[in-house]
Image: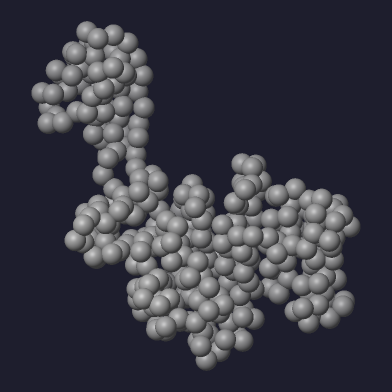
Amino acid sequence: MTTDHTRRTARTARSAISARGLRKSYGDKLVLDGIDIDVTEGTVFALLGPNGAGKTTAVQILSTLIRADAGEVSVAGHDLVRETDAVRAAIGVTGQFSAVDGLLTGAENLNLMADLRHLGRTEGRRRTAELLERFDLADAAKQLASTYSGGMRRRLDLAMTLVGDPRVIFLDEPTTGLDPRSRRTMWQIIRDLVTDDGVTIFLTTQYLEEADQLAHHIAVLDHGSLVADGTPEELKRLIPGGHVQLRFADVPTYETAVRALSRTLDDVPRDDDALTLQVPSDGRVRSLRALLDLLDAESIDAEELSVHTPDLDDVFLALTGQPKPGRPTGTAENPLTEKAVTR
């Protein structure tokens, strides 16, 4: 992700969202346990976590919908408590469930938002036309929103959020229920908002590929605590388990490979039924070349070879495991959790 945009962001390093010691309880249930969040201006920040981890509560607090029990928060340069109206003027929120009114046309939905934003008739209609064109909805502007496809409704929903020209946008599960093509269209829209308009995106999603594709920075929330944060690549490097899988065509070749690899490796996971071996690897070309050289030296021919490196699914599963008995709530079973917390 080393782009001109990334370098420009690194130089300015201005914070669009800053939270310190964010805490929230409902009765005796602790939902957020004093978390810290930093979101750099003009980037995509993804908050991941299993259901019940506290993601929605965090978004509701940061978008002024509910109050925190404790903590200091700044959004778009404004104090969340003392300057609530200024924060609301600077943000947009697109929830998981569409706010589109199916009884209105696409244009009418946008005009309504413009009126609610007190843009004035001329400016409001100009903004509506601009957004309809930008989101490829101009041809459907006079159609009832109830006739729109899922992807069109989602684009209209996001366009409605943009009527007020927000500098920070909270996107909650923006592509839930969309087909792969519509999902990728939405991804490109999100990228364009950041690269072209300098908007900051706070994203929550259950699609780990989505976070990997879009986010400059990711935080993982579990049981109300942040258990890891970093770039996608940094998080992937926390997780061991990269390997090369070899599949062989017959038992003699398979057994020869087992003996050859066992002379240099302590542990080579094997599947005798599938005739496959998993050779530990960091995924680098040098490691792969060394393995191929070893097989070639022993005249061993693998029928199939595939390289597996840890992805965000592996990170997510490792860092949000079930706590062991006797361990504090919020401490994942995997020892990488402690490593991640102290980063």
Relative placement, left or right, of 98 versus 75 is: right
Image location of residue 12, percent across then percent down = 47, 73
Relative placement, left or right, of 261 versus 236 is: left
Image location of residue 79, percent across then percent down = 50, 86
Image location of residue 293, percent across then percent down = 23, 22
Q: Is residue 217 visible?
A: no
Residue at screen point 35% across, 45% down: 314
Please determine whether, in this image, residue 155 is positioned above or below residue 200: above
Please determine whether, in this image, residue 14 is positioned above or below residue 310: below
Say which quarter of the image contains residue 90.
Answer: bottom right
Relative placement, left or right, of 153 versus 243 is: right
Relative placement, left or right, of 211 versus 317 is: right
Q: Residue furthest front?
A: 27
Q: Quadrant of the C terminus?
A: bottom left
Residue at screen point 70% across, 64% down: 99
Q: Is residue 172 visible?
A: yes
Front residue (pair 143, 306): 143
Q: How many marks?
A: 0
Residue at screen point 47% across, 60% down: 46
Residue at screen point 75% across, 79% down: 117
Image location of residue 122, percent across then percent down = 87, 76
Picture colour scheme: one colour
